[in-house]
Image (cartoon, grey):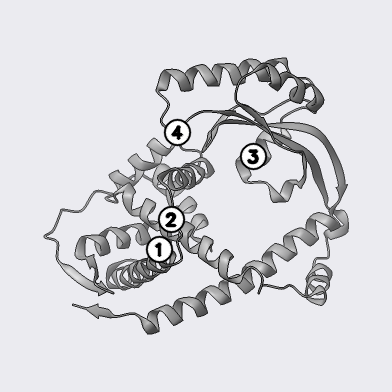
């Protein structure tokens, strides 16, 4: 089970089954040094609390797992820094918001659920930061090395006995961004969102969107792309499915401003293309996970890890 899926299950369990009480604050001490970067007893207690929520593992097992996860995260962040990779607050906020949306919570509500169960939301944000940074490191180093053999794809497809009965949607999508400076005041952001909503209400086709965008300042219309529904994030897939051809999804805050997705065309296709994409992604992820584990073992072997 992936980290995101474990967090989603845990958040649902907290919401439906009641909230845990926060543990008493204990005196903090350094428990591990990773290349002179400290991991404290507080860090370990917080990560252990997050592990209890996501795996139901508790006690000393959770603390041991938390300690090793934190060591790995420090190594991942150190390697990312060495390679010039940095993760912005906006990227972490977006990942946190995506996780919250998957359990049908707002980021604020998810933060509240974590706090009431004794886990500082910053603990989850730190975990997400390390994973985002590591993902960028892995892509930059191993993207060219991950190759999927055609024979493996065919074999995996043949194992799916129901593939002929499945259908998938193919979309031709176009992103429209109403640019907003990162440090713009709330009034300016609100005004730009209103402009985006007005633009959305006037559009009835992608051709019209490109023409109408010229009447607004600082609007970027990206080239159209063909995307299978299986390639879209959960929240975007649902929004696109509900959007008529020629219309746009609601404006959503993004790193560059307010973004809408125009649905230029949609059609149902046989599932073989969608199934192939899913199989290739799964095989690529498995290969990437093996490379990730090997890379991390190499970093641990070279690191100075001092358990206190």
Inter-mark Cα distance, 3 to 1: 31 Å
**Which disc, if any, is residue 182?**
4
- State the SS at label 3: helix
Which numbered disc flags the more N-terminal residue, 4 or 2? 2
Q: Quadrant of residue 67?
A: bottom left
Mark 4 or 3, which is nearer the eye? 4
Which numbered disc flags the more N-terminal residue, 1 or 2? 1
Q: Are discs 1 and 2 less than 8 Å apart at CB?
A: yes
Q: Is residue 101 above or below residue 243?
A: below
Q: Residues within 10 Å of mark 2 (few under 14, many from 20)?
A: some
Mark 3 or 1, which is nearer the eye? 1
Q: Position of residue 283 (x, y in %)?
A: 69, 69
**Which disc, if any, is residue 236?**
3
Q: Residue at x 80, y 61 (%)?
A: 276
Can you identify the residue that label 1 sits on? 81
In the drawing, does residue 153 fall left or right of residue 214?
Answer: right
Q: Residue at x 79, y 27 (%)?
A: 206
**Which disc, if any, is residue 86?**
2
Q: Foreground residue, 119 or 190?
A: 190
Q: Foreground residue, 306 or 79?
A: 79
Q: Position of residue 104 (x, y in %)?
A: 51, 38
Q: Residue at x 48, y 30 (%)?
A: 181
In the drawing, does residue 122 fall left or right of residue 278?
Answer: left
Q: Is residue 192 above or below residue 73?
A: above
Inter-mark Cα distance, 4 to 2: 17 Å
């Amino acid at each position: 089970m992936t980290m995101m899926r474990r967090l989603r299950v845990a958040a649902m369990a907290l919401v439906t089954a009641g909230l845990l009480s926060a543990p008493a604050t204990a005196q903090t001490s350094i428990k591990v040094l990773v290349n002179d970067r400290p991991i404290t007893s507080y860090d370990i207690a917080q990560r252990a609390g997050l592990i209890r929520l996501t795996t139901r593992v508790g006690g000393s097992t959770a603390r041991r797992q938390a300690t090793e996860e934190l060591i790995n995260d420090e190594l991942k962040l150190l390697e990312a820094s060495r390679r010039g990779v940095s993760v912005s607050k906006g990227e972490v906020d977006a990942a946190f918001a995506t996780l919250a949306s998957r359990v049908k919570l707002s980021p604020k509500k998810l933060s509240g659920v974590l706090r009431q169960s004794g886990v500082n939301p910053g603990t989850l944000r730190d975990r997400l930061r390390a994973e985002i940074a590591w993902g960028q490191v892995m892509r930059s180093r191993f993207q060219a090395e991950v190759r999927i053999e055609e024979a493996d794809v065919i074999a995996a497809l043949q194992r799916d006995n129901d593939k002929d009965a499945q259908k998938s949607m193919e979309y031709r999508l176009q992103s429209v961004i109403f640019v907003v400076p990162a440090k713009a005041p709330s009034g300016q952001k609100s005004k730009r969102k209103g402009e985006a909503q007005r633009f959305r209400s006037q559009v009835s086709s992608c051709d019209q969107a490109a023409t109408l965008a010229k009447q607004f300042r600082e609007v970027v219309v990206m080239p159209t792309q063909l995307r299978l529904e299986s390639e879209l994030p959960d929240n975007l897939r649902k929004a696109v499915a509900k959007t008529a051809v020629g219309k746009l999804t609601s404006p959503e805050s993004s790193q560059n401003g307010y973004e809408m997705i125009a649905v230029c065309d949609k059609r149902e296709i046989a599932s073989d293309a969608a199934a192939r994409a899913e199989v290739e992604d799964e095989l690529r992820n498995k290969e990437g996970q093996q490379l990730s584990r090997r890379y991390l073992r190499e970093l641990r072997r070279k690191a100075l890890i001092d358990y206190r």
